[in-house]
Image: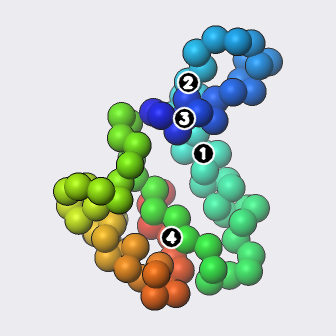
Amino acid sequence: MTIRFFFGYGEDECMPKTINVPAGEFQAGLVDLRDNYVAEPAGVWSTYLVGGSGEHVWTVGTRFSNTYVEGVRFVDWFADLLAGKAGHVGP
């Protein structure tokens, strides 16, 4: 939710208020960005999209080693990323 709030500015013609992009709309935007705008060059761009709300930092605590998306543990995806193996996990 923190990220949706942060990137929500610009919604509703930039009216100054608390803006929260709906989760489905935000997810669709991330998938569109991944699939249509930053896909090239292939093999250098990675995403790990975790569903839900209320979480902000995933690289500390038990979430780092206990989060699975599509059977892939976040810490393993992260290790692959550091080793130069780019790949997408998530919707």
Q: Nearer the viewer, mark 3 or mark 4?
A: 3
Separation of marks 3 and 2 at Cα, in angstroms: 6 Å
Residue 4 circle label: 3
Q: Which residue is mark 4?
A: 88
Dot 1 alpha-carbon crowd within 10 angstroms: few under 14, some 14 to 19, many 20 or more: few
- Callouts 2 and 1 close, C-beta under 8 Å: no
Residue 28 circle label: 1
Q: Secondary structure at mark 3?
A: helix
Q: Amino acid at mark 3?
A: Arg
Q: Residue at x 64, y 11 (%)?
A: 17
Q: Nearer the viewer, mark 1 or mark 3?
A: 3
Quarter of the picture containing the N terminus is: top left
- Callouts 1 and 3 close, C-beta under 8 Å: no
Against 85, is 78 above or below? Answer: above
- Callouts 3 and 2 close, C-beta under 8 Å: yes
Separation of marks 2 and 1 at Cα, in angstroms: 15 Å
Q: Residue at x 70, y 71 (%)?
A: 39
